[in-house]
Amino acid sequence: MSIEFEGREVAIQPGDSLAAALYRDGVRVFSRSFKYHRPRGLYCLSGDCPNCLVTVDGEVNVRACMCAAKDGQKVSRQNAWPSVDRDALNVIDKFHPLMPVGFYYKAGIKPKFAWPMAEGVIRRVAGLGFSDKSDAPRDIDRINRHPDVLVIGAGVAGLSAALAAAATGKRVMVIDEGSTPGLRVAAGPTKDAIDGLAAQVAANAGIELNTGTSAVGIYEGPMVLAITAEQTLHIHPTNIVIASGGMEMHRIFPNNDLPGIFMARGAARLAGAHGIKPGETAVVWAETQEAVEHAKTLAAAGMTIAAVVTGPGVDATGVGNRQISGEIVEAKGRKKLSGVVVRSTGGSTEEISCDILACGAEIQQNMHLPRLAYDLPCVLAGDAALPGTTLAEAEQQGKDAGAAAAAGLPLYVNPPASKPRQCGTAGYVCLCEDVSVKEVEQAIDEGFESAELLKRYTTVTMGPCQGRLCADQLRAIAERKTPSEAARVSAPTTLRPPVRPIRIEQAAAGARHHIERHTPLHQKHLEMGASTLWAGPWKRIFSYGDMQAEYEAVRHRVGVIDVGTLGKFLLAGPDVVEFLERIYPMRVADLEPGKLRYGLMLEEGGVIIDDGTVCALEGGAFYCTVTTSGAERLESWMLDWREAWGLDVFVVNQTASLAAVNVAGPHARDLLEKLCDDPIDKESFPYLRHRRITVNGVSCLAIRLGFVGELAYELHFPAAHAVEMWDAILEAGKEWDIKPFGLDAQRLLRLEKGHIIISQDTDFETTPWKVSMDWAVKLDKPDFVGKAALVRSQRRTPRETLVPWQMEPGMATPAEGSIVTVGGNLNGRVTSSKMSYVLGHPVGLAWVTTEHAKAGGTISIGGAPATIGDHAFYDPEGVKLRA
Amino acid sequence: MSGLLRGRTFFKKYPMKKSYDIVIIGGGAHGLGTAYYLVKNHGIKAENIAVLEMNYIGAGGSGRNTTIVRSNYRTPEGIRFYERSMELWRGLSQDLDFNMMMSNLGHFTLAHTDSSVRVQRERAETNKVLGVDSRLIFRDEIAELCPELNMSLDVPYPIEAALYHPPGSVLRHDAVVWGYGSQFSMRGGHIHQGVKVTAIRKDSAGKCIGVDTSQGPIDAGVVMSAVAGWTTQVTDLAGVKTPITNHPLQAFVTEPVKPLLHKIIVSASLHTYISQTDRGEVLIGSEIEPYTTYSMRSTNTFLEHSTANALDVVPLLARLKIQRQWTGYCDMTPDYSPIMGKTEVDNFLIDAGWGTWGFKASAVCGETMAELIATNRTPDLIEPFRLSRFAEEMLVPEKAAASVSH
C-alpha cells in the first residue's frame, strides 16, 4: 500500500496518518509558513496547529496528522515555489525588517497607482493552496440523531461519563475524532486506562461509540454539528458531556517554529502510537509530570534523551541523561533544530545539541467547545473542565458528569474564562500568520492596545488554528504592556464555530435542494411542451410554445389555464365575518351568499401585500383566494391575526387539496354547457357570482371573474379529478380550437385590461391610493389592518402613481424595468410592458410622479414617447367579461 | 517605502474631559469618520470632540460586514449618496495615509428570474442616467467575465442575467476604522474605548446637554449617536422613537486559498454573496435573519443554507474549508434606507438605520454628518434620509437594491 507524494511513491502502514507515513519516509518540512515562507515541521499531531496542512486529492488544507493514509491518495505540500523543500519565496523572510507589523496598511499608499499593481502580486502570494476547480460538489448525507446523552471525546473522562450515564438506562452516544479511542495516546497508564474503559463501553449495549467523528459546533437546541469522512451529523441530545480534553500550551521563545520542535504529546504520539523514532537526540521540556512519561516513550523508541528540563514540582529522576530544573529560552538552527539553550533555575545558561525538542508545557483546556456551549445544557469533564487532571480525577469527574447529564440536571455551563498565559519575550506567537512577539509589541506601541484590536491588526488568532495556540498568549502580551488597564486590554476574544474546519459541501449536507411545488396537471403541461417559471415555491406554466396563439384563443375563441397554484382558504366559525371585515379593507358583511368581491390585503402600514377574491358561501362560510406566491405567508399572517384578536374562526388551507382551472373566452359558456347540465347562462349565473355546478360529473365551485377581460369561469374542485377535468375541457373545446394558455399570455391579457399584478407592479410602499384603487377601501369601517396608516396617508398626495400607458403602433415594446423620463429628467419606471395584439401597439403600466400622472400626458420611455391612459385599453366598459 | 521604517503611532490616549463641544457615541467607521471630517473639513478643534466607544473601536458593524463598496442603488437619492461615497473611497488611502487595500474586483448582482431581471434593468438604467457605471449583461458575457459561475441551465435557478457594476470593490473594513480614528486621534481628538453611555442628559426645555457614562458625566453642545445595531438602546435613552428593528446577519470565511474567484458575486434570489479577500479567504454571507434579537450566537441553519446556495452559484467552492462564522446586528428600516440627521430632541442627532448597507456609506456619512454638525444645516445629500420621512410618507425605497446585495 502506498500514497503518491509529489510524484513519488511513499509506503504506508496500517494505522498511519498521512503525517506518520510521510515522516517515516523522511519528510521533515511539511509546509511553508503563510507570510515569510519559513519551513515548518510536525508540531502538535492533534489537528490543532497549521504546520501540516497539505493538499490531498485536490482538497486543500488537509491536516496530515488527522487524515488516515489510504492507498492511492495523491498528496502534495502547499504554499511554496518551486517546492516546499527549496522555497524561493523564503527570501521574504530576509526582508523581515522591511515588513513591519501592519505592513500592508502602511505601504502602497503613494503613488496612487502602486496599490492596484501590488495587490495583484499579493493576491497570488497569499492563500495556502490551489483549490481544485474541476470537481463538482459531492452530496453528503445528513443524519439526525437523538441520544439522551451525547459525550464528546472518548478519553478517560468521556468514556467514564458514558458508562455512568448508560448505567441509569439512558441512550448514550459517544463521538471521538480518532478511529479508535486512545488512537493518538502512546503506551502507558493513560492508554491502559482508555483501553480498559473502551472494552467496557464496547460491551455496553446502551452506548453507541462513533469514532472518526469530529464535533465542529454546538448550537442552540442544543444541536451538535459533527462530521465524519462520509456524513454530516446533526445530533440533538438532551444533555451534553464535553470531555474534549486539553492540549499542551504553545511555548514562545526565539526560533520556536523550527522543524524538530514538537509538543511533547505530539512527539510521543509519533513514537508511541505510530512506532516512528522522531529523531536521534531529544531534549524534553517537562513542565508537567505527564511530559516525563513522554520522555520515557521517546527513550523506549530508541532516542537518546540528552536532557529533561523540568518545571517546578516535576520529578524526572532517572529519565534521560541529565535532569535540569529550568526552562528553554532559545532554539538553535537554520532550517531545522540543531540545539536548545537552557536556562537553569540557578540562572546559568547552556546550549545542548539535539534534533528534537519535545515541549511538555502546562496543559490548557480545549476551550472552543465549552465556550460555544455557553448557556446550554452541558457538563464539562476531564481536562476540558480542569486542565491537568490526573487519571483518577478524570475518571471521577467523568462519572459525576455522566450521572449529572443522565439525570438531566439543569447544568447550564458557564465555562471558566481562560487566563492570559505566560508568554516569552521573543519568538512566534502565531504560527498560522507568522507573527512574532516583537511585532505584537510594536503594534501595541502604535496604539493597538487591546487583544481584540491586536487580533485584527496583526491577524494573530485569525488563521487556521483559530487561536488555539495563540489567543491566551496574545492577551498576556497585551496585559504585560498595558498593566493599568489589564481587564480591558486582555479581555478574551470571541471563539466561533466551526471548531474543526468543515468543507462547504459538508456544511451544505441535506440542504442542497429547492422545494418545487407542482399542480396535479404539471406532467400534462410538460407533455404538451410547456416551458415553466418560478412563482414563489411553485413551478408554473410560462407558455406552451406559441404565446400569441394562446392569447388569440382567449380573446377570440376559448382558452384554459391551470390556476391550481392560487392560495385557497375556507374560512368558517362564529366570528368569521368580523374576522374578514378586519382582514380586508373592503366590506364583507353585506356580501350575500353566491356573491363575491375583489379584495386587497394590506399590512399595518397600509401597503398592499396581496390580492384575491372573497366568496360568501351558503351557511355562513367564506372561500377566499390569494396569489400563488402569497399562500403560505398569508396563512400564517391570518392565523397570527386570529390569535391576536382572539376570534373564533377556522382557517382551512385548501391550496393543495383543490385543483383550479380558468376557462376563458367568448365561447367559455358554450364549452362548459357541453360538460354541465346546471344553468350557467348570463341571467342565472352573472358576473361576480359563484355557484356550485357539476362539470364532467365533478362538483365544482365555479366563480365568474374577469382577470383576462373575457367571459370566464374559474372552476375549483378536488385535485384528484384534475387530469380528467383538463382532458374533458380540451376535448369539449376542440370545436373552437381551444388552447391551454400560460402566464405569458395571461400577463398580456390582464395588462390590456389594466389589471395589476401584486409585486410586479407594486412594491413595498404601494398603498391603494397610489394604484387608484380607492374603491377597494372602505375607510368608514370600524377597523381593518392598515386603516390607521391609510387615514394618515390619505391626507397627502402620493409622490408616485401607477398609470397605464400606450405607445403608437409600430414602436418597439420597451423592456420591463425601463425607466421613465419627463423633460429629460428621471421620473419613474415601467413595471409591465407588452405588445398588445388586439390593439396593435405597446401597452403597459408605469410609476410616474403624481404631478405627471395625468391622463393624456406624455412620458418618455427609453427615449420613445408614450401616452398615459386613464382606463383599461381593452373593452373599457367591461362588456365582454359580463357577457 | 522609507515611511515603513520609521516608528509610527496611530493612536494617542488622553484623559477624559468633563466637557466637549461634540460627543459622538459609537467608535465605528461612521463615528470616527464624522469626527475626522469635523476636524479636517470644518476646522473644529479635535480636542473638543470625543468619540465614546463602549467596546473597542470597530467592534460593531464596521468590523463585521461584507466590505463591499458600490453605488448601483435603485433610487436617485440612494445612487447620489453612495456615488459620493465611492468618490471618497477612491482617494481615502491617500487622504488618511493608511492603506484601505481597495480591491476593484467588479460587482455582479445575478438575476435568476424574470422579475429579478426587471429589477436589475431598472437599476442599470437609473444608474446610467445618474452617471454610475453599471449595465445589464446576459449569459454569454457573464460566462466570459466570470468563468467560475455555474452557467448550467440544468439547475433550479439558472443564471439569466446580471447587473454588472465594474467599480464595485472590496476593501479592508478595519483599515477604514483605524484610518479615520488614527487621523482624528493624532490631531488631538479624544477616543475613549470601554466607555458606555448610560443616559442622554436634557435640560428643562428638553434640549440635549450631554451624556452620562460608565466613567462619569460629560457636558456636550451636540451629541450624535452612530451606533447602528445598538441604536434603539441609545434612542431609548434620548426618548426618540425610530421605526428600527434589529435583526442578526451572519457570514463565514473559508481558510485562505490561492485566487480562484475574481469578482464579487451577489444573488438576491439565492440569498448569497461571495467574494475572495486579498488574504485568500472566501467570504460568504446571506441576508438578514427573519427574526429580531440582540443575540450574537451563530446558527447552523444559516451555515447550511448559505453553503448550499453558494454551491449552486459557484460549485468549485465545494472543498474549501470553513474557518469561522460570525454574527452582526442590522438596524433595519422599513424602506431599507438610513436615518440621518436631526431628531425632535434638539442637539441630539442620529446616524442610524444602517441595516446591511452601512459600511459602504461610512465615508459619505462621516462627511455629511460632519457638515450638519458644523453648519447646523442638513446637507442636500442626506435630506431625503431624515427621520421625519416616515411620518410624512416620503420613503426612499431601496429594498430591491439593498437587501442581500450589501
Image (cartoon, grey):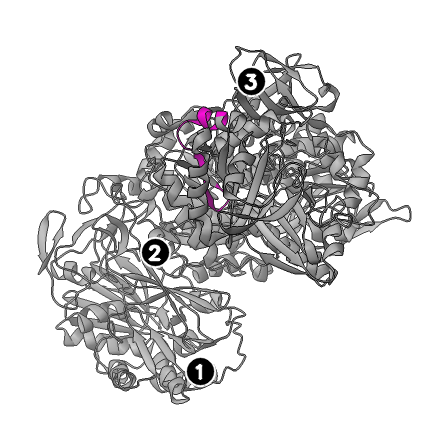
**Residue under numbered circle 1:** A401
Circle nearer the N terminus (3, 2): 2
- For the residue pair A645 and A345, the one nearer the viewer reads as A645
Residues under numbered marks 2 and 1 in contact, where contact means CB atoms less than 8 Å apart: no
Circle nearer the N terminus (3, 1): 1
For the image, the number of numbered tags is 3
Q: Position of residue A773 (x, y in %)?
A: 72, 34
How much space separates mark 3 and mark 2, taking CA atoms?
Answer: 51 Å
Residue A541 visible in rendering: yes
Q: Which residues are magenta?
A: A535-552
Measuring 70% from the left and 27% from the top, which residue is drawn there?
Answer: A801
Measuring 55% from the left and 19% from the top, which residue is drawn there?
Answer: A838
Query: Of helix, strand and loop, which one carries label 3?
Result: strand
Vertical placement of residue A236 versus B23, above or below:
below
Quadrant assignment, res B275: top left
Q: How many C-alpha atoms fall within 10 Å of the one at disc 3: few (<14), some, or many (≥20)?
A: many
**Residue under numbered circle 3:** A842
Q: Position of residue A822 (x, y in %)?
A: 66, 15
Q: Amino acid at mark 3?
A: Pro
Q: Amino acid at mark 2?
A: Gln
**Pointer 3 chain:** A
